[in-house]
Image: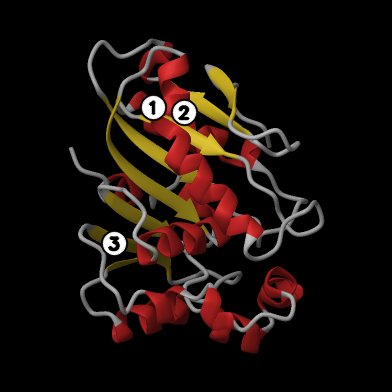
Amino acid sequence: MSGPLPDATLRWAEHDDGVLDVHLPDGRLPRHAARTVLLVHGGFWRSAYDRRHTREQARALADLGWVVATPEYRRVGAGGGWPTTGSDVRRALDLLPELLGRIGVRSGPTWAMGHSAGGHLVLWLAATGAPLDGVVALAPVADLAEALRLGLGDGATAALLGDQPTEVADPAVLLARRPAYDVRVVHGSADEAVPLALSRGLVAQHPWIGLTEVDAGHMALIDPGSDAWPTVVAQLPG
C-alpha cells in the first residue's frame, strides 16, 4: 500500500533511508507558521516495512490543516537496530525546521504521532526530552520488557535490541522522567499484534499519560476510513 504521493521528499542524511516525505495542507505552502506532525511509521522496526504504508494517514492529517513529515529511518535488516533506529528518528526531528525551510515552510507547534513500533519511537522521543509540543502513540509497543517476554512480532524486540538490555530503549522505564507536554495513547481492544495490556501497563506505571481505548484492531488506527479514526484525530489540538 503506497497511498497518495507526498508533496515533497527531502533528504536529511546521506544513507539510503535518510529521506522524509512531506504532505502539505491542500498541497500548498502555508502562508504562516504551520502546525506540524512528525509521523513515525511502524512495522516492528524491520526493513520490510517503510513509510509508504502511512501515506493515506499522512494525507488525511494534511487535509485537516497539518504539515505532515514522515521520516524514513534505518531498520533491522538494513543497517538499523538500537541505538541507530532511535537516533535516526531524533536526528530527523532535530533537522525538521531546517528541512521544511528548504521548501518554504516555517514550522510552528510540532507534535509526534507514531503507530506500533513508531508508537514506541515517539514515546521514546518524549522520554528523552525531544523538543515537541505533544505526542500521540497509536497501539504502541510501550513496554519492551513485556514485548520481549511475549515474543511480539516473531522476536522483533530481541532483533531491535541485539545484546542490549530493554531498559536502554524502554518507554515504560524511561518515562519516569515526565516531559513538559502531553503524552496520549490510543489502543484498540481487538489488537492482536500489540496487546492493549502493554498500554494499560504503561499508564498504570505513569498515570499522567492519557489512554483512550477503542473497539478496533491494530491497523484501524492508521486507516482514515475506520470508525477509530475520529478518535485518533481528536488527540491532536484544534
Mark 1 to mark 2 CA distance (whole Å): 5 Å
Up the image or down, 11 lies above or below 118; here it is above
Mark closer to the chain start, 3 or 1? 1
Tag 1: amino acid: Ala
- The residue pinned by badge 3 equals 183
How many dots with numbers?
Answer: 3
Q: Left or right of 192: which side holds 26? A: left
Rendering quarter of residue 9: top right
Mark 3 to mark 2 CA distance (whole Å): 23 Å
Element under disc 3: strand
| Residue sitting nearer the eye, 189 or 127 | 127
- The residue pinned by badge 2 equals 59
Q: Residue at x 71, y 77 (%)?
A: 158
Tag 2: amino acid: Arg
Q: Is the C-beta separation of discs 3 and 1 under 8 Å?
A: no
Residue 213 position, x and y percent, is 34, 68
Q: Left or right of 98: which side holds 162? A: right
Q: Is the C-beta separation of discs 1 and 2 under 8 Å?
A: yes
Q: Which mark is residue 62?
A: 1
Element under disc 2: helix
Residue 181 position, x and y percent, is 22, 57
Rendering quarter of residue 204: bottom left
